[in-house]
Image: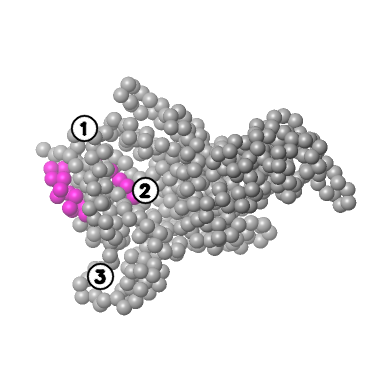
Amino acid sequence: MPNTLLLRVEGVNLSSFIEDCPDLKTIRGGSLLLRGAPQRILDYLAASRRAASAVSMGASIGVISIETEEEPAKLREEVEAWLSRHRELRYASFVVDVIRSTGQWANERESLLSANRHRQMEAPRLVYPFPPIADEPVAERVCKVDRVRPVWPHTNGLSPATDIRSTQGRFLRQDFYRIEAGDSYADLEFSECLENVACEAPGQPLADKMAIVYLDGNKFGALQARFESQTDQIRWDSFIRGLLKKALRALLDWAKSDSRWHFDNGRGIRLETLLWGGDELRVVVPAWLGWETLEFLYEQFEGLTFAYTGLAGPVIVPLTFAGGLVFCHVKAPIHPLNHLAKNLADLAKESVPSSGPAGNFFAYQVLESFDQIGKDFFGTLTERFGFLGRVPNSNAHLGGGTMPGSKHSKDLLILDGMRMKEIRRLYSKVQDDLPRRKVIALGQALLAGSDDPAALAEAIKVPNSDVRRPVSAGTLQHLDQLVCLLGGQPTGFFHLAELWDYIPSDTRRPA
C-alpha cells in the first residue's frame, strides 16, 4: 500500500555558486538555476510516474509530497544521484532528506529541517568539478572568470561550472520573465549587463548610476512555523507565489509603458532581477527609478493579510515587508551591494516589534564613492553630516504646524514605505524653490540647537541675483510636512539632502 513520503531539498554553500565571481551572467545563471531546482526535482519525480505534488517551493528550497511504496532512504539516494548527474545542477551543493509522513505537519516540518541541517554539517564541502568523463585530460589552467576552478577542454577558458552558469544566465535572462509573468511578456528584451541598466541615458543627470532594491518579508518564517496543517502550508506557498507573480506583471506593465525604463531606442527594459522567490526579491534598476520602484512594490504589497487555522481557531495575520535601497555607480562591485541592501532591510526589521503588527519600513544608503561600500553606514553619515549621535530634541517649525523632534537611535535611518508617494509629492513642491545647500544649512542650524525663528529664517533665505528673498510660506509649509515624514528635525533635513537627486519630481506616475 502506498505511503506518503515528504522530501525536502535545499541549496547550500550558495556563495560558491552565486558569489564566487563578479560576472553578471554567471551570477544570474547560478541564482536562477538554484531557484528552479526544486521544480526540476518535482518534474523528475512526476516523469518517473510517481504521484508527486509541491507542498512548498521557495528560492532553492522545496518540500515535495510523494505517494509511493519506496523506502525513504532509497528515494533520497535516487534524487541525490540524479542531482549529481544533472548537466547543470551537479555543480551546485544540495542536501536532500526524505521522511514518512505522519500527518503531523508541525513535527514533519521540523524533522525535515533538522535532517537537512545535520546533513549539511556532516558534509562541509563544496562540489569540486571533476571531469564528467574519466579519460578527459587534467586541466592546466584556471577559469578566467571565477579564478579558482580548473578549465576543461571546449569551455573557452571557463570551468564547466562557470560555463554552465554563464550560458544559462544568457538564456534565462529572457525566459525568467516569460515563465514567471506569462507568455505575453516573451517579446520584451531586458538588460544584458548593468551598463544597460544605467548607461546610455542622454540628458539624465543620474546616468551611470543604479539602484539596488531589496524586499524581505517580516516574520514570514515565524508565521509558517505556526502552521499546524500541511494544507495551510500549501495555501501559503500558493499565496506568496501568486503575489510575486502579480507584482512582477505589474512592474513589467509599468516598464513597458514608461520610456524612462527603455534603452536601445525603446527596444530594451532597464531591469535586472537578481532574486525573485520565496519571500525575497532583489532587482537592479536605474538610479532615477530606484525610489519609485520601491514605492511601486510597496503599493503592490499594501494591506496584505493571510488567514490560517491555529490551535484556537482561525487567525488572520497582516503581512509586511522590510526594504533596503542602495544608490551607487554602475561600476560598483555587485556582491557587497547585495549584502548592503540586505543589511539595510535587516536594520528596518529591527524596528519591527517583537509582538503586534509590523510595518513596511525600509532603510537606504547613497554611495558617493566605492570606498563607502562595506563601511559602517552610521559612521559614514555622521562623517558627512555630523548629525547621528548628537541630535537635539527640537520642536521648531518653519511655516506653521508642528514637527516632532527626532530621537537618538537607529530609527533615524528608517523610513515608512507606505509614505513614499506622499514624500515624492511634497518634494516636487519644495525642490524648485529651495536649493539643496539651504536644506543642509537648516539642518545644521537646528543641530546647533537654534529654535530662534529669526535665525532659522536667515538660514533659509535664498539668493536671487543680488537680492535675498525669503522662501514662500507655502513652500515652508510643504517643507514642514516633508521633514515630518522623513523623521522630524533636524534628521529630516539630512534625509532630504541625501535623497535630493534621487527622489523624482518630474514623473509619469501620479503623485
Which element type, helix, strand or loop, lies under badge 2? loop
Position of residue 389 measured from the top left corner of the image (x, y, whole percent): 59, 43
In this rendering, the answer to whether 251 lies above or below 419 is: below
Q: CA distance from mark 3 to mark 1?
A: 43 Å
Name the residue type under label 3: Pro
Q: Nearer the viewer, residue 449 or 248?
A: 449
Bounds of the magenta segment: 60-80
Residue name at image x 41 percent, y 31 percent: 306
- Work out whether mark 2 precedes mark 1 in sequence or the reverse, and give the earlier one: 2
The residue identified by callout 2 is 59
Which element type, helix, strand or loop, lies under badge 3? loop
Does residue 79 appear to the left or right of 223 in the view shown?
left
Residue name at image x 41 percent, y 37 percent: 219
Check the image and name the residue furthest to the top. 312
Please name the colour scheme applied to the rendered image: one colour
Alpha-carbon neighbours of circle 1 within 10 Å: few (<14), some, or many (≥20)?
few
Where's the C terminus, which quadrant?
Answer: top right
The residue identified by callout 1 is 103
Residue name at image x 42 percent, y 53 percent: 176
Position of residue 461 measured from the top left corner of the image (x, y, whole percent): 81, 44
Q: CA distance from mark 3 to mark 2?
A: 28 Å
Q: Assess whether residue 101 is covered by the magenta stretch.
A: no
Does residue 121 appear to the left or right of 469 in the view shown?
left
Q: Which mark is residue 144?
A: none
Q: In which quarter of the view is residue 164 placed?
A: bottom left
Name the residue type under label 1: Gly
Check the image and name the residue furthest to the left. 1
Which element type, helix, strand or loop, lies under badge 1? loop
The residue identified by callout 3 is 131
CB under 8 Å between discs 3 and 1: no
Name the residue type under label 2: Ala
Q: CA distance from mark 2 to mark 1?
A: 25 Å
